[in-house]
Image: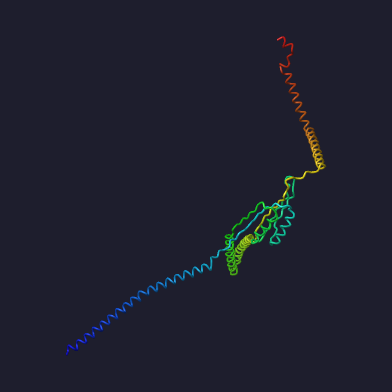
Amino acid sequence: MYASTKLPRTSALFMSALLGGLIFTSCASSDRSTNQSAPQVAANGAVNQLSARENSISQKAEVAPITRSRPQLIKKAAISLTVNSVDKTVDAVSQIINQQQGDLIGLKQQQPKSDNPRYTATIQLRIPENRLEPTLEELAKLGTVESRNITAEDVGDRLVDFQARLTNLQKTEANLQKIMDRAGSVRDVLSVAQELSNVRQTIEQIDAQLKSLQNQVAYSTITLNLEAAVSSTSPQPAFGLQVQETWNNSTHSLSAFSVGLLKLGIWLIVYSPYLLIFAALVYGFSRWRRTHSPRLTQTPESTRSE
């Protein structure tokens, strides 16, 4: 009886152990699968976040490009034209200056001469920097362009330097003003006032240079050279004019020759005493040489006797 009761107990324990092992293995396998899938999911999520960040950065870079400061350029242009009429061209240039909101800063006209038969003119004008190219195009329409050039100088560094120095000097001026307000003795007040005066003078000089550079950047300078066209065959003067010109030249030559002779006579009259003395010396020397020369004193008879 004891054996019959013991067998069912052992069988029950065996079944329970078998079921527990199966449950444990299934749980372990499930845990391993979950543990292996978790790093994959985390890695995929990190990669997705990284790619999303790169996409957002690239989109921001495309939306917000890098901003660069505009160069501060002083532009100067020169253009030479050959025109039919210099006077009419000067009037047309004045109209172009008014249209482009510029200023005329120089005008030099040269009338034709005998050695240079062409009528020339030089005009200097100042135009806003953004209207330089349109102005040059309008000027080129007034005649035949012989030459054209544009030069530019970047003064951005000088402007930044002047602005920085001006800011520092203004701060120094404010500090000196505070020190002057606190100074008690007359000597301290005078020394601070002298230093403040030097700082203000330097501020005015730098401010003037800064404004001059800014004005040169804002307005460009154009030098326009005009030259009148001349035909290849010059007209011959009339016969009467040629005769008159020949008569004038001959009379002028005769008067010049007469004046030259008169000047020579005056010179001879003034130096005549010296000329007479020189002539007397030459004559006396020749007489003395003749009298004291032995060969010259011998007669022909003496030479025959010998």
Nearest the camera: 261 or 21? 21
The residue depicted at 60 percent of the width and 59 percent of the height is: 73
Position of residue 62 relative to residue 107, above or below, is: below
Nearest the camera: 48 or 190? 48
User: Which quarter of the figure is the C terminus placed in?
Assistant: top right
The residue depicted at 52 percent of the width and 67 percent of the height is: 62
Nearest the camera: 289 or 48? 48
Position of residue 218 relative to residue 41, above or below, is: above
Horizontal relation, residue 288 to residue 174: left or right: right
The residue depicted at 22 percent of the width and 85 percent of the height is: 11
Position of residue 107 relative to residue 203, above or below, is: above
Quarter residue 14 falls in: bottom left
Residue 18 place in picture, x, y as percent: 26, 81
User: Which quarter of the figure is the N terminus placed in?
Assistant: bottom left
Residue 287 place in picture, x, y as percent: 75, 21
Residue 283 place in picture, x, y as percent: 76, 24
Nearest the camera: 16 or 162? 16
